[in-house]
Image (tube, rainbow, N blue to C red):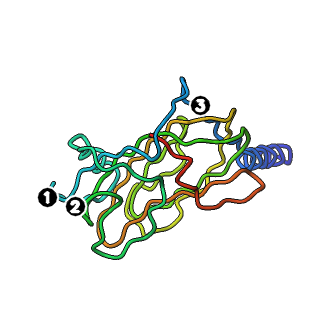
Amino acid sequence: MTFIRTGALAAALALIAGAAMTAPLKLQPANPQPSPKAGLDVKYVGSGTQRKIRDLKQAKKLLSKAQPGQPLRGLDYRDTNKGEKVLTFSDAYNVAAEITGYMRFDSPGVYELETWSNDGIDAWVGGQQIGHVRGIQGCEANQRTEVEVPRAGWYPLKITYFQKLGTSCLMMKSGKQGEGVAWTPNNVFGR
């Protein structure tokens, strides 16, 4: 009986240790490497849909009717006041956006990426999900994700984002492991 308990305890401890030591997500660079213009491409669908956007699933459905919008300067859209437009779109509420482009890393290594949003987000870089909030929330950090960048260069970026009511924000923090994270400068994004 003691052997079974000890074995079960050892297995549980190994599982916990394995979860704590999860390897960073390995990013895949764009192939071929692009020579992008500054900013990010964006497509929008707004409140003209006559529907309140409540979650990512609904936002993704509505985006099938999205229209190209004015490109984003990067991912530095701080929390707005109520009634101010969402990103580069003309509406302030019930907006869904599909954002595409590239993110540049200047050297290989392990990085920490952290998305911030108000409301939902599904963010991918280099083929790996780095941010996910299904529903509505205030302007806050989603989660911090460790990623492995195998080589310097451009990595594909795709974000589905929606804003329901109130204020809006969409931002990113990043930094090389051990050096801390800071707001990501707009010049590392390309389209």
Mark 1 / mark 3, whichever is N-terminal:
3
Does dot 3 land on a helix, a strand or a loop? loop
Q: Which mark is residue 52?
A: 2
Residue at the extreme bottom of the image, as rendered: 81
> Up-down: is 161 above or below 65?
below
Does dot 1 land on a helix, a strand or a loop? loop
**Quick check: marks 2 and 1 in contact, CB under 8 Å?**
no
Q: Residues within 10 Å of mark 3 (few under 14, many from 20)?
A: some
What amino acid type should be assigned to the residue bearing mark 3? Gln
Q: Which residue does the image show at 68% across and 39% down from the upper left?
A: 148
Looking at the rendering, which quadrant does residue 86 occupy?
Answer: bottom left
Specify whether 122 is left or right of 180.
left
Q: Which residue does the image show at 38% across and 53% down from the upper left?
A: 161
What amino acid type should be assigned to the residue bearing mark 1? Gln
> Up-down: is 128 above or below 181?
above
Mark 3 / mark 2, whichever is N-terminal:
3
Q: Which mark is residue 50?
A: 1
Looking at the rendering, which quadrant does residue 174 occupy?
Answer: bottom right
Q: Which residue does the image show at 27% across and 66% down from the upper left?
A: 92
Residue 56 is situated, as x and y percent measured from the top left of the image, at: 35, 51
Nearer mark to the viewer, of 3 and 2: 3
Q: Residues within 10 Å of mark 2 (few under 14, many from 20)?
A: some
Residue corresponding to mark 3: 28
- Comparing 60 with 115, the one in front is 115
